[in-house]
Amino acid sequence: MLKLERLTKRFGDRTAVDAASFEIDKPAMIGIIGRSGAGKSTLLRMMNRLIDSSEGMMTFEGREITNLKGAERRAWQSQCAMIFQQFNLVPRMDVVSNVLHGTLNRRSTLSTVFNLYPREDIHRAIEILDRLGIAEQAPKRAEALSGGQQQRVAIARALMQDPKIILADEPIASLDPMNAQVVMDTLRRIHEEDGRMIVCNLHTLDTARRYCDRVIGMRDGRIVFDGLPSQLTTGAARDIYGAGADFSEAATSTDIAALEREAEAAAI
């Protein structure tokens, strides 16, 4: 279904992603973990075609995606929606209009300029917001919402595209634990109810274990782990985060985040 073959990205003499290869043969919720700078975000941006790869190939349902240009590239980005850590909403615009931005790739320039939307699209946007538990926020400015609510608006915007794949780049990194759980519960429910593939960059092991069907671990741009959450042993965690990290099976997300910061400081 989705196949990456030695996908690589270089920025000058620095290799951010080094020959990443994996295959996802059916809709699943995939977690990509690793410390900051491991290459997770760059990998997702190549998959969405926000940036070009330096080498390698990606195919989806047998079609090569790596070299798409122009309208074909934009069509792929509609099928492969992206959710960002910082939400990427228009702060002064109302919530429902932010959600409707998920239709931009299929709208004319004239309708975009004058902010004109078909009635059925407006109704669908409100239905999606209702599904995510925030329909009452539809007329408010996005900037008036909490971080967790804003991230759900971003998820609603992605759903407005009716994508086959949702890529979520550290979707809970800016949220408190309660809102983080709401957002992850929402993504998991979308996967289960809609049968959509979700690939989610995450920072902590316990989140990956709890929500994902499969976990891919990255370190220094390379994939160093690819397996089931139950296979995320202490040894696997050290391969991902560094030999100096003292991980235990019962570690909390706070403990893990602290160890990750220590590992990053030691690497500088």
Image (cartoon, helix red, strand yellow):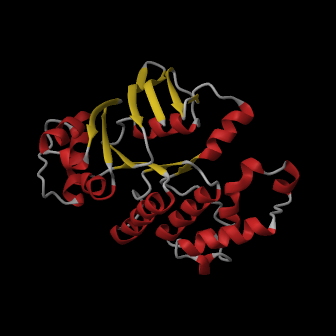
Q: Position of residue 161 (x, y in %)?
A: 64, 54
Q: Which quarter of the image is occupied by the C terminus?
A: top left
Q: Residue at x 59, y 58 (%)?
A: 159
- Farthest residue in the right direction? 110
In the rendered view, tell whether residue 20 sits above or below residue 144: above
Is residue 263 depicted above or below 59 in this figure? below
Residue 209, image quadrant = bottom left
In the rendered structure, the answer to whether residue 239 lies left or right of residue 113 reads left
Residue 220 appears in the figure: no
Q: Which residue occupies the foreground of this view, 18 or 243?
A: 18
Q: Is residue 53 above or below residue 264?
A: above
| 156 on left or right of 32 | right
Q: Is residue 197 above or below residue 97?
A: above
Residue 204 percent across, percent down from the top left: 28, 52
Can residue 235 be seen from the camera position used here?
yes
Q: Position of residue 201 (x, y in %)?
A: 40, 47
Front position in the image: 151 or 162: 162
The structure residue drawn at horizontal position 22% and vertical position 41%, both measured from the top left corner, is 263
Q: Residue at x 38, y 65 (%)?
A: 180
- Asked if residue 82 lies left or right of residue 214, the reply is right
Looking at the rendered structure, the number of numbered marks drawn on it comes to 0
Residue 211 image offset from top left, x and y in percent:
33, 57
Q: Residue shown at 57%/65% (left/top)?
A: 153
